[in-house]
Image (spheres, rainbow, N blue to C red):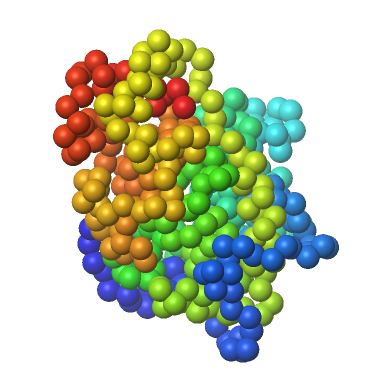
């Protein structure tokens, strides 16, 4: 963990407490509260494209092009210096279904012009660009899918069919933002320190550099709280991210954080219900055939419900006890994120699909499920035998 000054450059990089495009809006504009975002009103019919939940998740920028294009000028960098090889190296993914047969075989993957063409074909997951007839990027924005989708690698590493809801643990958000030509060296160093699969959604508010793992966006139906620290349900966090992190044109208010951002028109709030409903359809992925020992998993289920005391917090079928929160001391967790949030505690993480997204815990401190079990065995003084721990891991892999 390190502290950095909230310099002008940092303010530009992540917007601090307001979106520049909305800063001069009248105070009479509506301000959805944290409570209201828990149960947002139905989206009005004819709200404009993209209108379906999947299209919003994949393609809605909320008007954030004003930030990523006009302020950070990332479109210039992409157009001039980011070829497909570089894009894949920083974890961006290519949707192969958007490409005509033979495209990749005939394309120059070392040319930024090919990246521009991929953007024009809507093939770069999580990026939305307007490309002129002359092949120039006029606008560049980001969507939910940038961090919360990946691909199945069916064509090549980083190239395949979309997997919505899967966390992109290859994505190096910090390295991408650090490409901006308007940032100073110190600010770029902060972003470059994050590494793949990590992001800090509070850095632009408190100046503390302590990124966490990008979480899955699947398996959240019937889960009371979405985030590691349980700030609120899906629509609360979707609004927080869309407005304060993606820098879309929307209204967000939470007195606990001292944030009151107002936008007119509000492009975010009306679409939150439809987006939430799509996310509720994203089921945890089933474990691959042969990835766990069924007999050991059955023994592990007994440990999970008995000697391991796992089910006291990871309550089936959601495998969480949210909205109950736990102090860091209860689980032997790093307390930094809990202190930076509004709740002071941690939500019990749902376990369905856990096999898919190592490492574990909010900060990635457990590389494997074996490490997770060992942590709790030591922290909670469970006294599990090596065989019980092995069986418990197999059960976790089966969820």
Q: Position of residue 196 (x, y in %)?
A: 39, 44
261, 79: nearer the viewer = 261
- The picture places residue 119, in percent across and down from the top left corner, at 65, 49
Specify whether residue 270 is in view.
Answer: yes
Along the viewing direction, whichever of 81 and 303 lies nearer the viewer: 303
Residue visible at 28% across and 37% down in the picture: 366
Is residue 159 something that shows in the picture? no
Residue 42 falls in image quadrant: bottom right
Left or right: residue 191 compared with residue 371: right
Q: Position of residue 120 (x, y in %)?
A: 70, 49
Q: Is residue 236 above or below residue 265?
A: above
The vertical placement of 236 against 326, above or below, is below
Residue at (27% x, 73% y) in the render: 5
Direction right: furthest residue: 46
Q: How many marks?
A: 0
Q: Residue at x 39, y 17 (%)?
A: 297
Q: Position of residue 333 (x, y in %)?
A: 24, 48
Closer-to-camera residue (104/206): 206
Left or right, residue 338 beside residue 37? left
Up/down of 241 relative to 102, above or below: below
Position of the N terminus, as image quadrant, is bottom left
Q: Residue furthest top?
A: 295
In the rendered structure, the answer to whether residue 391 lies left or right of residue 319 reads: left
Indicate the quadrant where residue 36 lies.
bottom right
The structure residue drawn at horizontal position 62% and vertical position 36%, both measured from the top left corner, is 162
Q: Is residue 146 left or right of residue 169?
A: right
Say which of 6 and 211 sits in front.
211
């Amino acid at each position: 963990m390190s502290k950095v000054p909230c310099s002008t450059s940092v303010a530009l990089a992540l917007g601090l407490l307001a979106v520049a495009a909305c800063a001069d809006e009248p105070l009479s504009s509506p301000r959805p509260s944290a409570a209201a975002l828990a149960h947002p009103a139905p989206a009005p019919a004819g709200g404009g494209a993209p209108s379906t939940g999947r299209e919003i998740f994949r393609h809605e920028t909320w008007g954030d092009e004003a930030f990523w294009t006009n302020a950070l000028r990332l479109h210039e960098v992409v157009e001039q210096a980011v070829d497909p090889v570089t894009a894949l190296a920083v974890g961006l993914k290519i949707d192969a279904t958007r490409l005509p047969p033979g495209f990749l075989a005939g394309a120059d993957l070392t040319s930024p012009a090919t990246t521009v063409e991929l953007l024009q074909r809507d093939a770069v997951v999580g990026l939305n660009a307007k490309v002129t007839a002359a092949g120039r990027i006029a606008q560049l924005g980001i969507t939910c899918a940038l961090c919360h989708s990946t691909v199945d690698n069916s064509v090549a590493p980083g190239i395949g069919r979309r997997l919505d809801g899967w966390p992109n643990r290859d994505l190096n958000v910090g390295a991408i933002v650090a490409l901006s030509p308007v940032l100073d060296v110190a600010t770029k160093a902060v972003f470059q320190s994050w590494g793949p699969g990590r992001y800090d959604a509070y850095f632009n508010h408190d100046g503390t550099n302590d990124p966490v793992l990008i979480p899955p966006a699947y398996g959240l139906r019937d889960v009371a709280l979405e985030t590691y620290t349980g700030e609120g349900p899906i629509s609360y966090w979707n609004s927080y991210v869309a407005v304060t992190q993606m820098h879309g044109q929307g209204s967000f208010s939470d007195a606990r954080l001292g944030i009151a951002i107002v936008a007119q028109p509000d492009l975010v709030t009306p679409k939150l219900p439809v987006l939430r409903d799509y996310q509720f359809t994203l089921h945890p992925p089933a474990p691959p055939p042969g990835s766990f020992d069924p007999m050991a998993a059955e023994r592990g289920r007994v440990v999970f419900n008995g000697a391991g005391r796992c089910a006291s917090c990871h309550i089936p079928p959601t495998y969480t006890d949210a909205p109950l929160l736990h102090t860091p001391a209860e689980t032997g967790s790093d307390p930094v994120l809990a202190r930076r949030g509004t709740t002071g505690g941690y939500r019990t993480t749902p376990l369905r699909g856990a096999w898919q997204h190592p490492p574990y815990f909010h900060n990635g401190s457990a590389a494997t499920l074996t490490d997770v079990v060992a942590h709790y065995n030591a922290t909670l003084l469970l006294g599990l035998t090596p065989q019980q721990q092995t069986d418990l891991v197999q059960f976790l892999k089966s969820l």
